[in-house]
Image (cartoon, helix red, strand yellow):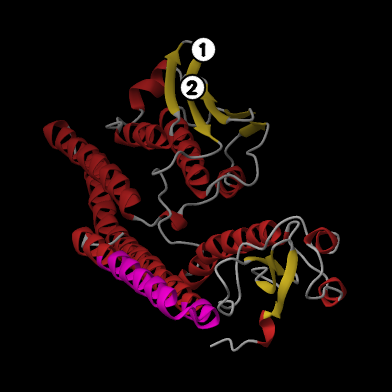
């Protein structure tokens, strides 16, 4: 989109006014000179110039959008790089602090042990919040696929049962949201119910994909020892699904803990997170040019069909006409309708004459090239306008 809409609109108005002035001047020149061929050539040049101007403007707009998308993706790439650096440095340092606090907790007793436990607890929360924040800054393409995530955890000994499957060909935004949904569900299950089996169920309709992650509730000792969380990951997931047009539910009862997310199979306009256009500016410009070209061709063919309808005189029929022939005899060789467009002005004739004009079917305008003039019920002049000067 142009950053200067007012300037762009003013430029468009100027171009339209200039084209209108040129068209009026061209029509006035033709009315004076009657040089039809030159008029048609100049008219064609004007159309081509206007069309090229429109294509240039379209290409500049498409290129501007493409460059903005590239710049946006570069920002995302920088964020991902910074997130990785923070994860490697700050995350490592926090892990060392937690490790030292755990060692102190084991060796000390009394208030010192409680203080060490508190420090370890705070560090765990800080690590969790850091991970959540870094997930938000990473580029979308860095997300792990759902199948890859499940296979990795299964190989590590986690019991995961899948029912159904994730459909193929989903939009990138939906795939990323599904990956985040499964990741959050598995993370919560592993944190709050370690060692318990996890079930993942996919339900698919023509419009939606529903993903359910379920795990049994842990026993009382496990519930006391599980680490608390802030819930920011689930809140972020709920907001992301809402942007895509889906919804999110949590069920926590004696039957277990269940996370259910519904994702649309097609995202609504404006919800895309993949900002890089998949079509180059030149290709988009060519595509946009095909519509006016196709419309012009259709109009030209329609006009030609109308111009030659019942107005074509055969060469032999016109050659068979003679001066002095009655209009009744001439009518047997002439079409029922005159051609609407003339090639060149006809030679001057007496005001009492009635002249008719017919085409030989020339493409694309069906120009009138045969003149037949009558007076008092008979032919007084036959003119082949193709022999006249065109300029």
**Which of labels 2 and 1 is toward the front?**
2
For image coordinates 79% across by 72% down, the residue present is: 324
Is 323 in front, or is 215?
323
> Which of the labelled discs sits on residue 255, or is there none?
1
| Residue at x 45% of width, y 41% of height | 180
The answer to whether 31 appears left or right of 25 in the picture is right
Residue 331: image quadrant is bottom right
Q: Is residue 3 above or below residue 178?
A: below
Quadrant assignment, res 253? top left
Q: SS class of the residue under badge 1?
A: loop
Q: Which mark is residue 258?
A: 2
Is 196 part of what is drawn in magenta?
no
| Residue located at (48% from left, 22% from top) | 258
The answer to if 39 sits in the magenta stretch is yes
Q: Position of residue 189 (x, y in %)?
A: 47, 30
Residue nearest the observer in this picture, 261 or 102: 261
Magenta segment, which residues?
Answer: 14-42
> What numbered label is drawn on residue 307?
none
Outermost residue, left side? 111
Asked whether the residues under the numbered discs 2 and 1 touch, taking CB atoms below 8 Å apart as contact, a structural biologist would say yes
Q: Quadrant of residue 379?
A: bottom right
| Front position in the image: 218 or 204 | 204
Q: Disc 2 versus disc 1: distance between alpha carbons?
A: 9 Å
Residue 329's place in the image compared with 321, above or below, is: above
x, y (%) of residue 133? 28, 48
């Amino acid at each position: 989109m142009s950053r200067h809409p007012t300037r762009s609109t003013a430029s468009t108005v100027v171009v339209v006014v200039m084209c209108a002035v040129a068209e009026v001047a061209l029509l006035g020149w033709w009315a004076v000179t009657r040089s039809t061929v030159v008029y048609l050539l100049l008219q064609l040049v004007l159309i081509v110039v206007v069309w090229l101007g429109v294509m240039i403007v379209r290409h500049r707009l498409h290129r501007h959008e493409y460059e903005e998308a590239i710049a946006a993706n570069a920002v995302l790439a920088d964020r991902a790089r910074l997130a990785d650096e923070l994860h490697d440095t700050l995350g490592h340092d926090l892990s060392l602090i937690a490790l030292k606090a755990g060692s102190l907790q084991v060796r000390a007793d009394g208030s010192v042990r409680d203080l060490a436990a508190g420090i370890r607890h705070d560090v765990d929360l800080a690590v969790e919040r850091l991970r959540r924040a870094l997930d938000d800054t990473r580029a979308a393409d860095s997300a792990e696929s759902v199948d890859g995530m499940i296979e990795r955890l299964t190989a590590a000994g986690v019991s995961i049962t899948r029912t159904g499957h994730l459909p193929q060909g989903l939009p990138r935004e939906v795939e990323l949201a599904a990956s985040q949904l499964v990741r959050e569900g598995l993370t919560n299950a592993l944190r709050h119910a370690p060692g318990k089996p996890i079930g993942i169920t996919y339900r698919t309709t023509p419009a939606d994909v529903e993903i359910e992650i379920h795990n049994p509730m842990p026993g009382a000792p496990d519930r006391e020892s599980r680490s608390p969380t802030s819930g920011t990951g689930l809140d972020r997931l709920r907001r992301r699904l809402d942007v895509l047009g889906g919804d999110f539910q949590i069920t926590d009862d004696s039957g277990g803990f269940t996370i259910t997310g519904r994702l649309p199979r097609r995202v609504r306009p404006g919800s895309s997170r993949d900002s890089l256009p998949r079509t180059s500016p030149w290709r988009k410009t060519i595509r946009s040019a095909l519509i006016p070209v196709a419309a012009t061709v259709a109009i030209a063919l329609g006009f030609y069909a109308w111009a030659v309808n019942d107005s074509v005189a055969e060469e032999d029929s016109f050659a068979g006409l003679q001066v002095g022939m009655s209009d009744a005899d001439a009518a047997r060789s002439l079409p029922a309708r005159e051609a609407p467009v003339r090639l060149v002005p006809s030679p001057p004739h007496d005001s009492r004459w009635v002249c008719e004009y017919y085409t030989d079917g020339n493409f694309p305008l069906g120009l009138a090239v045969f003149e037949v003039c009558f007076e008092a019920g008979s032919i007084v002049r036959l003119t082949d306008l193709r022999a006249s000067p065109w300029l």
